Image (cartoon, rainbow, N blue to C red):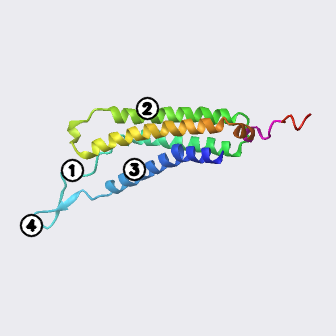
Amino acid sequence: MIVAIVTSAIMFSFIPLIQVGMVMAIQARVGAVVATIPAPSGDDGTMEAFASGANFQGAEPARLAVQTILALTFLVIAALAWRGRVPRIRLIYSVSIVLYSTLTIALALQAALSPVDISQGIDSGTEIAHTLALLQAVTTALIMLYVLWYVNRAPARAFFRGYYLPTKEDHP
């Protein structure tokens, strides 16, 4: 049971939180770049740079906030599932796995199947990004199926219930 919970927590909480942290760190680093350049050799001062910064597609603050909230919410659900004593947590955990997986697969397929925007330039990274998005969709689907299968096995049901059902040997 622990393997399924840890796997899903990594997939739906830790990886998204690490991604948000990295994007925010890069944005802070790029935002801290001084937008001035040394003046031509005749001047002693500096000039304003014509352009500065970077374009982070899909890294709007609202989207990062939603990703953070969803990741933390799933982390709470996974922690409650780990304890296994909250009534109906198996159902809540299973439904959240399906919802988060469906959302992740939809976003990955949207990224994989979107046409290349020529205005952003053409490079080999575009094809790699499309391939990785397809890989993410397939991996997410496999993890979802594994976790749902594992959670619905008899030992996992007994874990969430808190006791094993009596057998014929227990009550002749």
| Quarter of the rendering occupied by the C terminus | top right
Q: Looking at the image, can residue 54 be seen?
A: yes
Residue 29 is situated, as x and y percent measured from the top left of the image, at 35, 57
Among the two numbered marks 3 and 4 on one chain, the one whose residue lies closer to the N terminus: 3
Tell me if 61 is positioned left or right of 117 in this view.
right
What element does badge 3 sit on? helix
Rate crowding at label 4 as few (under 14), some (14 to 19) or many (20 or more) other CA atoms within 10 Å.
few
* Residue nearest the viewer, comparing 112 with 58: 112
The region drawn magenta spans: 159-165
Q: CA distance from mark 3 to mark 1?
A: 20 Å
Residue 23 circle label: 3
Q: Is residue 170 above or below residue 29?
A: above
Q: What residue is shown at x 48% (from left), y 45% (from top)?
A: 16
Residue 162: which quarter of the image?
Answer: top right
Mark 4, residue position: 41
- Mark 4 residue type: Ser
Q: Is residue 4 left or right of residue 69?
A: right
Instruction: Indicate the position of residue 134 as horizontal and vertical percent values.
Output: 39, 38
Helix, strand or loop at mark 1: loop
